[in-house]
Image (tube, rainbow, N blue to C red):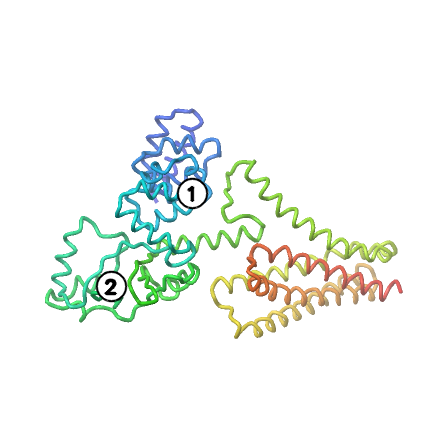
Amino acid sequence: MTETKDQNNLLTKLGSAIDSVTLNQVRHILNNLRPPDIAHQLETAPHKFRHILWELVDPEITGEVLQELSDEMQIEFLNRMDGAEVASLTEGLDVDDIVDILQQLPDQMIPEVLNAMSGQDRLRVESVLTYREDTAGGLMDTEVITVRPDITVDVVLRYLRRFEEIPDITDNLFVVSRNDLFLGTLPLGKLLTSSPTTTVREVMNVDVQAIHVDLTDSDVAQLFQRHDLVSAPVIDDANHLLGRITIDDVVDVIVEDADHSLLAMAGLSHTEDTFSSISRAAPRRAVWLGVNLVTAILASSAISLYTEALDKIVALAILMPIVASMGGVAGSQTLTVVIRGMALGQIERSNVSWLVSKEFVVGALNGLLYALILGAIVSLWFNDWVMAFIIGLAMAINLMAAALAGTLLPIVLRAMKIDPALAGTVILTTVTDIVGFVSFLGLATMFLIS
């Protein structure tokens, strides 16, 4: 608690220092923070202050700070550097962190950075760059400690003492054959508590969840969550050990996926920056607003088909938004549940039909419930049981349609290689609006106007 309070006070002083333009004080405060906290300060600073703060960061820790920043901010700073500068700031970072930074660069600049690296670092980075960013290969770190199964615990301990330090988040050593085939893991707990004369084969763990190098990062995150992993080996088709994935990288994947889902539902890029410049933010949002305008016009065109009914009965105009709004909310509930199920890998061909049936019944039950409630309200409000019947029936129809659309849309969009989180909300809103308007006004025209 005391540490948090001191840090908050420190951040408050930093804000005051920026306002008073006392740059030496800012440098002192900034560089006494840990890299993640420095990155937080950069991300929460107004756009005009960011480059000033970046220039004040100690060059020895700029790489550690950079890897903690969002993709958009990384690109913003990297675009101002040449290859040698990028190679210098990535020196000493883990291979997976270096690769994450390089993947933000234009393709033509990556060879320039690689040429500026030492030979050993370049080979390690190039081996990971061959894999897609969103796979286990793109996440893995090639820096692993391996041992043979036929050596003793005492030999392993003497081998480890030769290292100046072991890789961060090392909970296991990896056991491999002479051909680097993965055989199992040697937990550090077992290593420290076993007799020095015991062989690795006797205490190694062979029941290990190894991860294929081409597995998607979302599937990797699910495996870590399901099996409570801290680290996991990465293997190829021939079972050769290629590297390891650690929990810190998986947490990044989970946060990025959550950010993507949240922002995509509002039509925003997953790299959206809270304090980005107006010139960046406005055009991005304008594109999706334009798409939404087109869908809104489609919904309005459905209303225009029933202008005669609206002209004759004012109550229709008063009640019409209720049906569309309820359908939109019900559809969004279903859509959110289905997209979440997809993200967790829970939805498969074998259970899709059951899911559709379940959501349809839920929509039908809620539709019936609120049809009765709204029908009673309208009957008392307008003293018109026919109007009450019409809006109640329209409500039931729209909630059932919303349930079907909310379930099927993400499945269809994913089959078409379209992001359901990005496109689903706008399409769903259009569907529920049109169904709501057409069902309500169509029934009104049939029973009240004809």
For discs 2 and 1, the disc positioned in front in the rendered view: 1
Q: Position of residue 232 (x, y in %)?
A: 32, 61
- The quadrant in which the C terminus is found is bottom right
| Above or below 105: residue 387 | below
- Secondary structure of the residue carrying tag 2 is loop
Answer few, some or many: residues within 10 Å of disc 2's Cα (few below 14, many 20 plus, some between 14 and 19): some
Rounded to the nearest angstrom, the CA distance separating label 2 from label 1 is 34 Å
Q: Locate residue 413: give its quadrant.
A: bottom right
Q: Position of residue 368 (x, y in %)?
A: 69, 69
Q: Earlier in the sequence, mark 2 or mark 1?
A: 1
Name the residue tied to disc 2: 180
- Secondary structure of the residue carrying tag 1 is helix
Seen at 30% across and 68% down, the residue is 208
Q: Nearer the viewer, residue 443 or 218?
A: 218
Q: Is residue 299 left or right of residue 35?
A: right
| Above or below 117: residue 26 | above
Check whether the beta carbons of the residues at disc 2 and disc 1 lie within 8 A of each other: no
How many dots with numbers? 2
Answer few, some or many: residues within 10 Å of disc 1's Cα (few below 14, many 20 plus, some between 14 and 19): few
| Above or below 213: residue 22 | above
Seen at 59% across and 65% down, the residue is 412
Name the residue tied to disc 1: 108
Q: Position of residue 258 (x, y in %)?
A: 48, 54
Q: Position of residue 183 (x, y in %)?
A: 25, 68
Q: Nearer the viewer, residue 415 or 387?
A: 415
Q: Amino acid at mark 1?
A: Gln
Residue furthest left in the image: 197
| Above or below 73: residue 357 | below
Q: Amino acid at mark 2?
A: Asp
Seen at 44% across and 60% down, the residue is 218
Q: Locate residue 239: give its quadrant.
A: bottom left
